[in-house]
Image (spheres, rainbow, N blue to C red):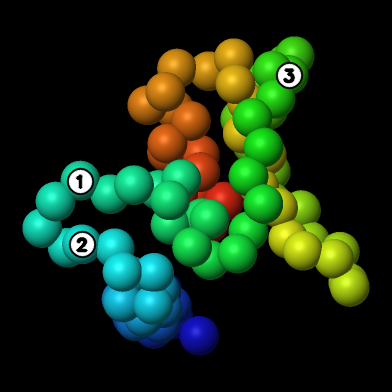
Amino acid sequence: MTGAEAQRIAALAAAHARKELAVPIDGPIDVFGAIEAAGIMLAFLKTTGKLSGAFVSEVGRKPGIMINAGHPLSRQRFTAAHELG
């Protein structure tokens, strides 16, 4: 797969997710609300080191996203969007 093909697939997946999660295209995005709408558990924990966040998935369990509560809100939102993706 070429880089251009991967970008096209990612863009289509993002458009599908935006529609499924009712994320507006022309306004602020509530990334934390989108995570909850996707049925993913969301936890904010203050961690040491450089870890910004993590996606956790285990067979038979609800997936989850952990965000470092020690980081600024802007970094938390970016990390949450990254983990959702």
Percent position (x, y) of residue 79? 50, 39
- Quarter-of-image position of residue 73: top left
Residues tagged 3 and 2 counted as in contact (Cβ below 8 A): no
Disc 3 residue type?
Thr
Looking at the picture, how far across and down is residue 37, in whole percent?
49, 63
Label 1 neighbourhood size at 10 Å, few (<14), some (14-19), many (20+)? few
* Rendering quarter of residue 69: top right
Marks 1/3: CA distance? Answer: 28 Å
Q: Quadrant of residue 25?
A: bottom left
What residue is disc 3 on?
47
Q: Kindly identify the amino acid type of the residue bearing the numbered disc 2.
A: Pro
Residue 31 in view in this figure:
yes
On residue 28, the disc is 1
Q: Are marks 1 and 2 in contact (CB under 8 Å)?
A: yes
Residue at (67% x, 37% y) in the render: 43
Q: Residues within 10 Å of mark 3 (few under 14, many from 20)?
A: some
The vertical placement of 36 against 79, above or below, is below
Q: Residue 61 or 75: which is nearer the viewer?
A: 61
Q: Which residue is mark 2?
A: 24
Q: Residue at x 37, y 26 (%)?
A: 74
Disc 3 to disc 2, how far (Cα)?
A: 32 Å
Mark in the foreground, 1 or 3: 1
